[in-house]
Image (cartoon, rainbow, N blue to C red):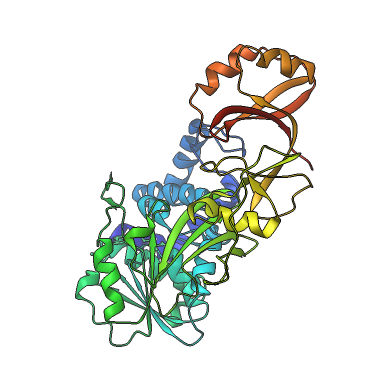
Amino acid sequence: MARFEALLTSSGSELLDRLASEAGAGGGIGGGGGARGTAGPRQALRLGTRLRVDYPTDLVVDALGQHELRTAAGAKFSRAMEMFFTRAGLEQASPQVVAEHTASRYAAGDTVADLCCGIGGDMLALAGHHRVIAVDVDPLHLRVARANADVLGVGGSVTTVLSDVRDVDLAGADAVFVDPARRAGQRRLRTGDSEPPLAWCLELAGRVAKVGIKAAPGLPREAVPAGWELEFIAVGRDLKEAVAWSPALATTGTRATLLPGGHTLTPAPAGYGAPAVPVRAPGEYLLDPNPAVTRAGLVAELARELGAWKIDERIAFLSADAPIRTPFGRPLRVIDSAPWNQKQLPARLRALDIGSVDIRRRGLAGDVDELRKRLKLSGTRRATLVMTRVDNRPWGLTCLTDE
Ligand SMILES: C[S@@+](CC[C@H](N)C(=O)[O-])C[C@H]1O[C@@H](n2cnc3c(N)ncnc32)[C@H](O)[C@@H]1O
């Protein structure tokens, strides 16, 4: 802790500023020379040696480490170069775009208890609009969270509490957000396990009505009681997390949210009499739904919204005869569609002038790398080869991505 405090002193911040300007904010040091122009280990050594003339060795070592973390954190936080991190804290931190979305689900003016705040990924977004009681059992994480709140100018809205969340009095909180740890020290916990466990987090709703629980995106629907909303959040096509919202915050049973656009898909209101989605052979277009839509169980909902059909009862591809414009999936134009025949495939692709393929496999076994090697393509066009099932028969589709 004393070593972290040293980074917050005037020499510490002077040294971090110097690193940002000498090593460059866009690149790390000692990263082995990467695509973003990172300096190599030799350069890092030279810089370290030079800095040790002016600063204590421990401070230089820690500042170099902090600079490295800040550089990596640029992928999650817009002001990463001003913030502080631990390696584990950064790995577990919610990206800013996700944290801002989840924070927006709490009513303005609510005091929110951020249980298991870590280095403050969620806390910082909450503190933009709410008073926050930030709790963590790890003194270093809590100290880093406090430093981040101060640096980003929201310190006045945040009270930090060093405690096991199980021992915290929630009397002053109108709402709770909890992001339990999915690792113990260096060790990842088993899938579905967390600290504190999900059962404890769910019981919070008996003490404070408005509760949001962040969980891994693999969280099964059955793990959450009736009346709770399960929201699956993707950034682009990258499924990031699931958040369970207690009945006081839930507005639907399940939801797919796509960031940064903020598009959200929910089921039609119950009793609306949603018609079954037909299953038919592929048409001119194929739609690969966003993983958040698939995880939320909303593929049929999306099909109804788009007037599309399924190509198989159990496969999450949709199809239509007109171009499909939606943020909820990636459209592909079908140029060849036939029962799967690996022997004939190279000839079929050659006839279509295909020179390279992305292979997307769903519902069909096979070694994608091995297949790619065997295709020996030489054409000029790039295509997506979809290995899947149509009406439960192995099927291959060659598609182009329409711009
Ligand atoms: C997933 S991280 C939180 C990340 C945070 N939401 C963010 O965006 O930066 C989980 C945190 O829970 C803390 N933690 C684990 N068990 C705890 C407990 N029983 N009481 C309080 N904090 C705990 C860990 O120290 C860790 O900082």
Where is 176 relative to 258, above or below? below
Q: Visible in this render: residue 168?
A: yes
**Within the image, what quadrant is residue 280 found in?**
top right
Q: Nearer the viewer, residue 274 or 207?
A: 274
Q: Quadrant of the C terminus?
A: top right
Where is 40 relative to 254, above or below? above
**292 with respect to 376 (left or right):** left
Q: Residue at x 37, y 54 (%)?
A: 220
Residue 151: x %, y % from top left: 49, 70
**Within the image, what quadrant is residue 391 found in?**
top right
Q: Residue at x 72, y 32 (%)?
A: 399
**48 with respect to 376 (left or right):** left
**Within the image, what quadrant is residue 305 found in?**
bottom right
Where on the image, by quarter, is ligand 1?
A: bottom left
Where is 361 relative to 5, above or below? above
Residue 84: x %, y % from top left: 44, 60
Q: Residue at x 34, y 59 (%)?
A: 222
Residue 367: x %, y % from top left: 50, 21
Q: Quadrant of the N terminus?
A: bottom left
Where is 381 relative to 80, above or below? above
Question: Residue pushed farthest left?
Answer: 167
Q: Nearer the viewer, residue 338 or 84?
A: 338
Q: Visible in this render: residue 55?
A: no
Number of on-image labels: 0
Q: Nearer the viewer, residue 126 or 61?
A: 126
Residue 209: x %, y % from top left: 35, 82
